[in-house]
Amino acid sequence: MNGSAGIAVGMATNIPPHNLGEVIDGIVALIDEPTIDVERLSHHVKGPDFPTGGYIVGRSGIRDAYRSGRGRVVMRARAHIEELRGGKTAIIVTELPYGVKKGGEGGVIEKIAELVENKVLTEIPLTDDALQDHSDKSGMRIYIELKREAVPQVALNKLFKHTPLQTTFGYNAVALVDGVPRTLSLLELVRHYLDFQREVVTRRSKHELRRAEDRAHVLEGYLIALDNLDAAIALIRGAADADAARSGLMERFELSEIQAQAILDLRLARLTGLARKEIEEEHADLRERIAELRAILGDPARIDGVIREELLEIKEIYGRNDDRRTEIVAAEEELDLEDLIAQEDMVIAITRSGYIKRLPVSSYREQRRGGIGVMGMQLKDDDYIEHLFVASTHDYILFFTSVGKVYRLKVHELPLGSRQARGSAIVNLLPFRQDEQIRAVIQTRDFKDAEYLVFGTKEGVVKKTKFDEYNTPLKSDGIIAIKLREGDELVGVRHSSGDDDVLMVSKKGQAVRFHESQVRPTGRSTEGVRGMSLREGDEVIEINIATNDADLLVVTANGYGKRTRIDEYRLTGRGGLGVKTVSLTEARGELVGARVVRAGYQVMLISDHGTVIRMPVDGIKRLGRATQGVIVMRLRGDERVSTLAPVVESDTRAELPEPEPAVAPVDGDGSPA
């Protein structure tokens, strides 16, 4: 019985309602087996049972609460997915978590509508009929229609994440024990309740025994008077007053004052033969009850037997038709949601302006029959694909942003687009602040792809943190990945093994290379240490892992560039100014881009006027470290190069289609191909 289990938990300050039958079964189990432990007791008391139904997600919170007296019970609405006409689907909610309002101000329907309007729940169309309350006298029914391209399970997960359709109940079993507040486990709670019931039964039995003995004493006086009725009547008639009659009865028949007074108060109707029989039967019953009460008080097992019988009687009366309403289901860590999602390789495309989409790899395989497949994304003239890689639907994608925060999504939570679609704006998926931009994207299945993550900032700070420290459930608004000083920005994030060389490049043409052992590993929300010293007006534009089999490609604002072998950059101490990576002049301009590249890589150069060219890095001349470079992009008037971007920055590039260039490719000297 929901809420009536106060017989077991009424002395606690914050315990959710339990099923009456389960609670009684648990108490009876403790009576029958005093040495029972909390694990076996929890087989009877399975968990809270809320009157509003729904689900309890996971047993870990219940186990913590039952073992220690404190825990968090995760409650979730009962919802299912229905297929609609036209290939659409809808989520139907039929039960809400305990304490959650359905409608009105602050209700769950209002919250969902607000999130749809704010484009947090992008799977739900922004129409009046997409969210409706169909509840009636037969039960509650909230109707939530989804867009045709939405993944229903992902949409449902987002509803659980962002709305009160999933909430928690803080379990806090505090009770007064001998006048002192204590936090009690389930076993302690039931034991103290049982001790309390033993005291109740003992005191009640003593009280009942006292009253029975008093009544039996009076009845014994009646029986003596009835056995000597004529003599008693004559004595009373001959007495001068009531006091003399009472004294005479006590002296003549050896009665107590209480018995003598009761005889004087006896009505004449009680002198009939029928009344005498009733008195005799009542006296016999009382003697039997007195013997039973004395036996109960003299045997603790009999007291427990009384408690057991009374509890089972309550269960029979009130718990007969009270089935459990709240279903306990496995949590996602106990039963992985991904068991319900097919594992499939997806191509993830993220553009510089912040659009993202995923598309099955099989789509590209079909396109490659006739030649080289194309991404076919409808991009703006000044936009380009910044990140393009293959990941499984079960992988995590970590988004590191310019303000030093990290956000996490599963691949299956990303919007599924067509080959031509631009995708969805990332700001619709993640709560970015104004001007917050993605600086690095890292995919992982189990956070074991590397030992560390190395971070670099615009002001030359470097930080190294264990990769698995980011394997934590992220808040909806992300968590701190690196603590930045005021005015600083995150430039890049790279995997490292613990035995790599770090390369940092500044816009004034300096580069510093140092072994990562010079950077002590620190926690997630730390600032880091000085990685590169900068002259006034300088800033870091690139951080990477230096390997001697690669080149460093640099490009200046006025369209000059070159490649230099990484092995030309000698190891220096962390925190130095470094060495020249290019000889800059006013005619060349400052560096606007630097990339570690290998043979076969392609890059795009984008100007501040929107001109875009694409070229293979093999066509850019390899020169020494302190040289000026050659023309890689011819500019007009006051046009300047603004961005150096990789076409594909993944070792899986051979498996992916080449993105379609925004303009015709050009040769390394800037002339049309």
Image (spheres, rainbow, N blue to C red):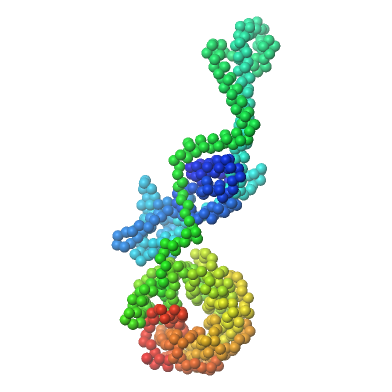
Q: How many marks?
A: 0
Which residue corresponds to the image point at 53% horizontal and 93% vertical from the top-left?
A: 624
Residue 600, horizontal then vertical, whole percent:
44, 86
Quarter location, residue 92: bottom left
In the rendered image, the vertical position of residue 241 relative to residue 649, given as above or below: above
In the rendered image, the vertical position of residue 564 relative to residue 414, given as above or below: below
| Nearest the eye: 249 or 290 | 290
| Nearest the eye: 177 or 379 | 177
Residue 287, horizontal then vertical, whole percent:
60, 22
Instruction: Name the residue at the left extreme.
Output: 86
Q: Quadrant of the C terminus?
A: bottom left
Quarter location, residue 214: top right
Which residue corresponds to the image point at 32% horizontal and 79% vertical from the top-left?
A: 369
* Residue 615 is at least partly visible in this image: yes
Q: Is residue 669 left or right of residue 276?
A: left
Residue 161, horizontal then vertical, whole percent:
47, 61
Residue 362, horizontal then vertical, whole percent:
36, 73
Which residue corresponds to the image point at 65% horizontal and 18% vertical from the top-left?
A: 258
| Nearest the eye: 25 or 188 | 25
* Residue 455 is at least partly visible in this image: no
Which residue corresponds to the image point at 65% horizontal and 14% vertical from the top-left?
A: 260
In the rendered image, the vertical position of residue 141 relative to residue 609, given as above or below: above
| Nearest the eye: 154 or 33 | 33
In the rendered image, the vertical position of residue 293 relative to residue 45, given as above or below: above
Quarter location, residue 512: bottom right
